[in-house]
Structures are given as C-alpha cells and as structure tokens.
Image: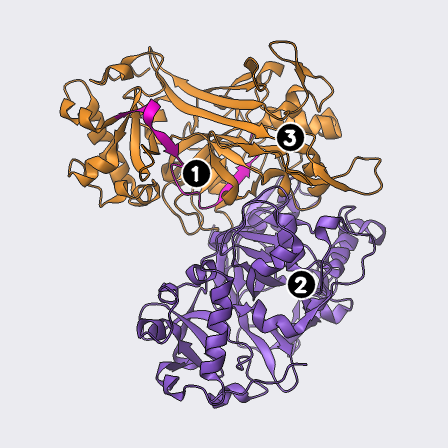
Chain colours: A purple, B orange
C-alpha cells in the first residue's frame, strides 16, 4: 500500500487530515466575499491555484482562473497529470516553501461548487440497496428487477438542483396518496430521506459509444453525493416513467473533487458476477474503489448519531461501467456530467445507505443518541456523509457532504 | 381571429408562408461558414438581428450578438415585448424598408441550434397516446396509470442529445431482450420510433415553486420536437426507473422558436377534466394552443407519405401546468430548459403521433405511397414533423423538424 507523501505543509502529514499530499483534491473557494478561485486542499490549508496561475507560477491557459474546474477538466488528461505532478513536487518535502504565501487557512475559506454540473444521472448499482428496496415492495423472491444483473440501471436526474455541501434543503411539497386514499393531496413529504452515493465527474467529453476502459479514463474524479429523496412523492409519481419531483429538491455534493489519480492506489474489483455481463460492460481491470463511507444524523441542538458505515467496494457496477452504458445509445457526454453511483448499502443492517432501508420503510424506527427515534428525516435534522480511502498512516478523504432540513414552504 | 399583419417584405404576405409578420420566430443562422447570428424569419428571408444590433439599429445589451437566444431570453420579459414590437413596426407596411440590407434569403442561410438547451424534460400529457400505449401493454381496462389524471407525468431526458432539424440520427445499439429470451443481447434497435411533440422553451428562470399562471409567463416560446425512441431498448430497461438509453440517441427540434406572443391568438383550453385537478395545477385560463401538426415519412429515394394529422389542442395538460408541476419540489428552472409535451396523438387512428401506435406495436403494418410497408423506422427513412397555427389567410408556422435515420454503428 502506498505510503504518505510528506509535505512541508506540516498539517498535511497527519494521519487524521483528509487532505495529505497524496490527495490534492480540487475545489473552488473565496475569501472575504471575493471572487471564487480554483484551489487545492493541503492539510488545513487551501493553495490558491488561481493566484499562482495569475502570477505565472502555473501555466494552464488560464483555466485555473475561471472560478470552476470545467475548463481545466476540458483541457485534457495531459494537463490533469501535469498539474498533479507539478503540485506534488511543489508541495512535497524539499519543494518550494515560498509558495506558503498562496496558502489560505481552510477555516477562512468559503467553498463554492467545484464545477458546473452539465447533466446529472443517477444510477441504482448497489445490489444490497436494490434487494432491500425490492424486498420491501415485492418480497424477497422478486426483489431484484429482471434486468438488474444485466444493466447498470440509471435515470436522468436534475442538474439544476445539485447543490454544495452546507446548502440548506427545504422539505419538498408534492402529490401524496396513500394506498387507501381515493384522491391524492398536496403537502409536505412525510418520508424524506437520504441516499448515500458517490458521484463521478466526467472530465473528457465523448460523442458516441465508448468502452468501459475509455469511460474509466474519461472520469476526472469523485465527490460524495447525497441524493435527497421523497419516498412518498416517488411512490405515487414513478409509474411508469420513473422518479421525477421526488428527486428534484436537492442533490448535495461534497466540495472537493478527489481525483481518480489520487484514488488509483485504492482500486478494487466489482463483486463476482451472478450472471455474465454482455461484452460491452466487461471491465478490463479493477475500476471500483475501496472507500470507507459513513452517514450521521444530528437533530437540531442534539447529538450526532452514526447511522451507517459502509464501503464503495460493495457496488455491483463501477462508474466506468455506468458511463460506458450511458453512451450505448450514442448519447453525448460532456465535461461536468455527474453520475451518481446509486445508494451504497452494505450487506448488514448497520451498513445501509438510506433511512428507507435502515427503518425498513418506517416499520423499525431507529433510536438516536439521546433517545429520540427516526423513521425518516425530521425538520432541523442535519445529515452528514463522510468518506475516506485509507492508506498506511494516511487517508485520502472527501470533504464532508452536509445538509440540514428546513420546514416545507407554507401551502 | 387575428388578421394577417402586412409587411413590406412581400413574401411574408403569402397565405402559404410559415413566417408572416404575425410570427417573427427567433433562430440562429450563418452564411458562408461565418459565425452564427441571431435572426428572425420573415417570409422567405431572415433578418440579421445581430448585425442590426452591431450597427445600433437595435439595442438589447449585446444579447442579439451572442449566437444564441439564451442571453436575450434571460434579459427579461420587458425585452421580449420590446423586440417584438420594434420588429413589428420596422417590418410592417410603412416600416423601415432601408432594413432590406439586413435581409438574407433563407435559402442561403445555414441554421443552428436557436438556444443552448439547459436541461430537457419529457412529459406524457397526451391522453390518447397514454391510453393507446397502456392498452397495448396492459389492456384497455388498465390503460391509464392510476396517477395519470392527477399528475402531468414527466421524466428527465438528456439535453446533450437534443439536435437541430436536419441532423442525421444513427440508429442506436442497446440491450434487447425478447420475452422468451433467457439473456439479453446487444444490437441495433429493431423498433426505432418517432414521437410527435411540442417543446416549450423556458425563458425566465425560477428558484422554487411557481403557479401555473407564473409558469405560463415564464415560457418564451415553442419548437416542434421529435423524441426519437427505441421501443425495444425501453421495454427491457425501463423498470423500475423509467426510460434512459431508449431516449438518449437524439431529440430533434425545429430551428425557429415560435414565441408565446405569436401564438397568443391561438390559445385554447385543455379538455374537460375527468377528475378534478389539485389546486396547484388548475389553469386560470386557456393555456394550450390550437396548432395543426403532421408527420410524414419518406424512404430513401421514395415518395413522402403522410403518417398522421393531429392538433396540439388534444393534450390533457398544458406546458404551463407541466412547468408548474416541475417546480413543486423546489426544483430550480433555468433559461433554456426544454419541456417536451409528450406524444401528441388524437382520438382517431389517423391522428396518432408515433409508429408504435400507428402500427399497433408492429401488428398492423402501415402501407406507404409506393407500396412499401412500415412497422417501425427503417434505415434511410426521413421523418418530418410540421406544425402551424392557422389564422384568416395566414399561418404562424414552425420550421420543419426533420431527421433521417442512418444504419447503426457496427458492433
């Protein structure tokens, strides 16, 4: 296993920091109400890459001065490698300590969306999740849809509702209809939920079908992703064309794009196949990652409770397989496309990635620290996703992905 | 009914032109390989609005010189009215004939996408279509899904695959599985189809729920829309999260945005409700339009056959209702969002808006001029959508929405 790369930024050498030199995640930040700037997190600091490019310390055709990572991603993989290598040299032990003038304490930085989301697609690649949800609705014999083991099932989500970690989420109103109600009514969702997911960010565009190997190369990096879901709105609306308003309130992402390059040492294989995949979906090598994930909940003014601990390595399909499938129809993919993995639930009750599964559709309320119980999210609750790939004495961490739920708008 | 507004551009005064002064649709064109420019069609000419603004004949903060209508749409409704009034004065009888220098023959203009599609949503608001499709799959008793009369059902489509009229469409490959096949296979769609739709273009953004009345005001205009659909890919993939790759090959739109202002005289009401709508979906007035629509098919080297004649006025939900529903969850809408109406099928066999319905799932092949038959689209076929609102001695027409099907990519 890779070792910690030591940096002259001392805080980056801690086993606890999510941002050692091995990581170098890309984000967008501002200070004092100024313009958003591209930066990379290192220890408890952010290195101002926009200022460095403006001063001629870096040269990437101005892409680092655009306040977004889209232009840099679109400038090509050669630049991805070049920037990472340059920063690794500059920030490493024996690097250029004069760059300390470009460091800003993370505590003083306001974070912004790291990239403009072109389009957002959400998948359903967690077998335990699909099995749990299917069991609740159709019983364990028919839990998995017949296509599930053949297709990385996905649907198009709504890019305009993707928000940065920390953005408040207003409980949605929508059409609700209980099984015994004659007519639907319009009101606040009573079954508002999280979905613990990993988001893959497309960095290289394509215009036609691509292979799984090409898809893997086209992914720039990853963010944590919480696909907020109104289960009751979804149950009534989703037949026959899938989820729509149930998934359009918000999708929260973590603020730093952890690059595929940083996650390279943590590659792992998808599970053994129960049925052979069609050729176009076959992986030429390990394309999933070993990333520990957790979710916590904190009622307003209350204590935090860990809801789940799981790992990305349980997923049945990798982002590369999903992206390749996404292009089979000829669908063009663009820089900034975001692909949600689907809910990441492990095999045990403690590793389920949604309240729907954790409370088994609300039938088994969860007891929180302090004694409150939860079936679904209540107003004021703060949900936090965390993630880290763990090396020997270091971790490649994701910034937290946080959202607090506010009461629904008055009708 | 409104009368023809006479123009000094003589070709605009014909009963046959789709582009009389009453219309003034907005498009983007170029000549001689030059840069794309905003223009309006008048008779058989296009008026170069970008050049007019550059020369100080129009003043809209440079939005007409961006090669796209997004910036102008985003500049606000007051500008929408101002430009339309200004052009109506300039081009009307007794207007400014010196502007003839800004006219370019349409025959010499290359047309481009009139706006950048932010996101694309497709609805399912044609009751006859939903009933026909439901009857084929579930029988007439259960044809309409239980939510259909309550919700303008929609799903998110793929904006990156929206293309301009005239763009060739490559038959998609995808996962196919017959009911008796043990395993799916990967190959060209055998049931590739059209969907005759109207696309609504959002011109005013919103950030939270809006009313139907507000939604109506936020729609800038309309385009014809063909939502190419691979029925066999869809049948296998769509459970449980809806259509995905079946709808991602291409969606073709007509090149001119016909404004809501131009269609104002043709407003009509949605049909009587079989069940009362929830308050948030109730229309304060007529928000649908009386627009004649047709589809033709032409085999390569063959003659054109009219497949269908129908009218937008058969739809159960208006674009304003769909847009209002789209925002119930809090989903932000942006300038350039495109909303497909859903397939526009009338009550008769001759007014069905898809081959799936016209050939009743392939069971009743259609005989074309010249004797060939069709169940679904064959390679080389050209499909054309036409549309026009008809006044007394004039029409407000849409440019044709055309696509030819090319053979699938080799596997």
Query: Which mark lies nearer to you, 3 or 1?
Result: 3
Q: Is residue A380 visible?
A: no
Whether the magenta-drawn stretch holds residue B120 is answered as: yes
Residue B50 percent coordinates (x, y): 25, 37
How far apart, in angstroms, are the residues tagged by discs 3 and 1? 34 Å
Query: What is the chain identity of the residue bearing mark 3?
Result: B
A251 sits to left or right of A320: left
Read off the residue under disc 1.
B212
Residue that carries the numbered disc 3 in the rendered image: B192
Question: Which of the two residues, B96 or B368, is positioned nearer the viewer here?
Answer: B368
**Secondary-structure class at tag 1:** helix
User: Is B46 placed above or below A280 here?
Assistant: above
Q: Provide residue A347's location: percent of width, then percent of height.
A: 78, 66
Q: In terms of image quadrants, where is residue A75?
A: bottom left
Q: Give the label on residue B281, or none.
A: none
- Chain assignment, label 2: A
Q: Toward the viewer: A121 or B68? A: B68
Badge 3 element = strand
Q: Are marks 2 and 1 on the same chain?
A: no
User: Which element type, helix, strand or loop, lies under badge 2?
Assistant: loop
Gap between marks 2 and 1 measured at Cα = 34 Å
Report the span colored magenta.
Answer: B104-125
Residue A235 versus residue B360 in the image, above or below: below
Whether discs 3 and 1 lie on one chain: the answer is: yes
Q: Sort mark 2 into few (<14), some (14-19) or many (20+) by Cα contacts within 10 Å.
A: many
Residue carrying label 2: A354
């Amino acid at each position: 296993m890779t070792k910690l790369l030591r940096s002259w930024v001392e805080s980056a050498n801690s086993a606890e920091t999510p941002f050692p030199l091995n990581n170098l995640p890309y984000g967008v930040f501002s200070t004092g109400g100024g313009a958003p700037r591209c930066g990379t997190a290192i220890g408890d600091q952010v290195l101002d890459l926009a200022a460095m490019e403006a001063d001629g310390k870096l040269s990437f055709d101005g892409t680092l001065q655009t306040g977004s990572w889209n232009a840099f991603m679109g400038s090509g993989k050669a630049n991805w490698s070049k920037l990472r290598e340059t920063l690794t040299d500059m920030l490493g032990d024996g690097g250029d300590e004069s760059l300390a003038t470009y460091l800003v304490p993370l505590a003083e930085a306001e974070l912004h969306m790291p990239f403009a989301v072109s389009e957002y697609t959400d998948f359903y690649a967690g077998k335990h999740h699909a099995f749990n949800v299917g069991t609740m609705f159709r019983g364990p014999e028919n839990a998995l849809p017949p296509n599930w083991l053949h297709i990385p099932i996905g649907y198009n989500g709504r890019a305009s509702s993707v928000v940065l970690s920390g953005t408040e989420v207003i409980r949605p109103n929508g059409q609700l209809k209980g099984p015994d109600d004659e007519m639907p009514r319009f009101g606040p969702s009573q079954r508002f939920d999280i979905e613990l997911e990993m988001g893959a960010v497309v960095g290289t565009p394509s215009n036609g079908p691509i292979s799984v190997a090409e898809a893997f190369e086209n992914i720039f990096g990853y963010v944590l992703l919480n696909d907020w879901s109104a289960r009751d709105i979804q149950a009534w609306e989703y037949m026959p064309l899938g989820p729509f308003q149930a998934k359009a309130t918000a999708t929260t992402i973590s603020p730093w794009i952890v690059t595929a390059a940083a996650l390279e040492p943590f590659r792992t294989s998808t599970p053994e196949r129960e049925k052979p995949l069609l050729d176009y979906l076959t992986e030429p090598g390990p394309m999933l990652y070993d990333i520990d994930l957790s979710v916590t909940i904190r009622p307003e003014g209350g204590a935090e409770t860990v809801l789940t601990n799981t790992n990305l390595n349980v997923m049945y399909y990798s982002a590369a397989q999903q992206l390749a499938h996404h292009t089979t129809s000829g669908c063009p993919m663009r820089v900034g496309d975001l692909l949600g993995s689907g809910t990441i639930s492990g095999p045990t009750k403690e590793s389920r990635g949604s309240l729907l599964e954790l409370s088994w559709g609300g039938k088994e309320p969860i007891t929180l620290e302090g004694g409150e119980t939860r079936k679904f999210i209540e107003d004021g609750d703060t949900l936090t996703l965390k993630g880290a790939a763990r090396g020997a004495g270091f971790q490649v961490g994701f910034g937290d992905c946080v959202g607090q739920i506010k009461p629904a708008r008055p009708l």
